[in-house]
C-alpha cells in the first residue's frame, strides 16, 4: 500500500530515529487521507492523526522481539 514507507525494525534498520517514525506516520496518513497537505480546515485532524500513528508505531517497535537480538 505505502511503498515509500521503509521497514523500521531490526535487522532492516539498526538505528531508528523519531524523525524516521514520524516520516513513516506522515506517509501513512497522506496515503489514507488522499492529501499531501491538507486544507486549513483539515489540518488539525491530519496532524493529530500523524502524531497518533507515530505513537502507535513507536510502541509497536519497542514491543517487538527479534530472534537473535534478545
Image (tube, rainbow, N blue to C red):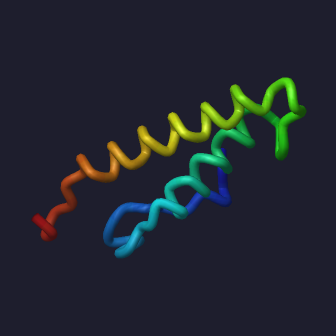
Please state if 33 lies on the left or on the right of 61 as rendered.
right
Image height of 58 relative to 14, above or below: above
- Horizontal and vertical percent for residue 11? 33, 72
Pick out the residue farthest to the right.
Answer: 39
In the image, what residue occupies the spot 27% across and 51% down? 62
Q: Nearer the viewer, residue 29 or 4?
A: 29
- Horizontal and vertical percent for residue 67? 16, 63
Please state if 20 lies on the left or on the right of 70 as rendered.
right
In the image, what residue occupies the spot 33% across and 52% down? 61
- Based on the displayed image, in which of its 4 quarters is residue 49 positioned? top right
- Horizontal and vertical percent for residue 59? 33, 43
Please state if 68 lies on the left or on the right of 51 as rendered.
left
In the image, what residue occupies the spot 67% across and 50% down? 27
- Based on the displayed image, in which of its 4 quarters is residue 10 positioned? bottom left
The quarter of the image holding the N terminus is top right
- Horizontal and vertical percent for residue 42? 80, 27
The quarter of the image holding the C terminus is bottom left
Pick out the residue farthest to the left.
Answer: 70
Q: How many marks?
A: 0
In the image, what residue occupies the spot 67% across and 39% down? 29
Amino acid at each position: 500500500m505505502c511503498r515509500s514507507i521503509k521497514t523500521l525494525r531490526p535487522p532492516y534498520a539498526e538505528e531508528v530515529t523519531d524523525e524516521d517514525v514520524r516520516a513513516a506516520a506522515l506517509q501513512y496518513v497522506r496515503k489514507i487521507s488522499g492529501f499531501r497537505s491538507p486544507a486549513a480546515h483539515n489540518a488539525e485532524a491530519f496532524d493529530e492523526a500523524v502524531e497518533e500513528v507515530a505513537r502507535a508505531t513507536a510502541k509497536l517497535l519497542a514491543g517487538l522481539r527479534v530472534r537473535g537480538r534478545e
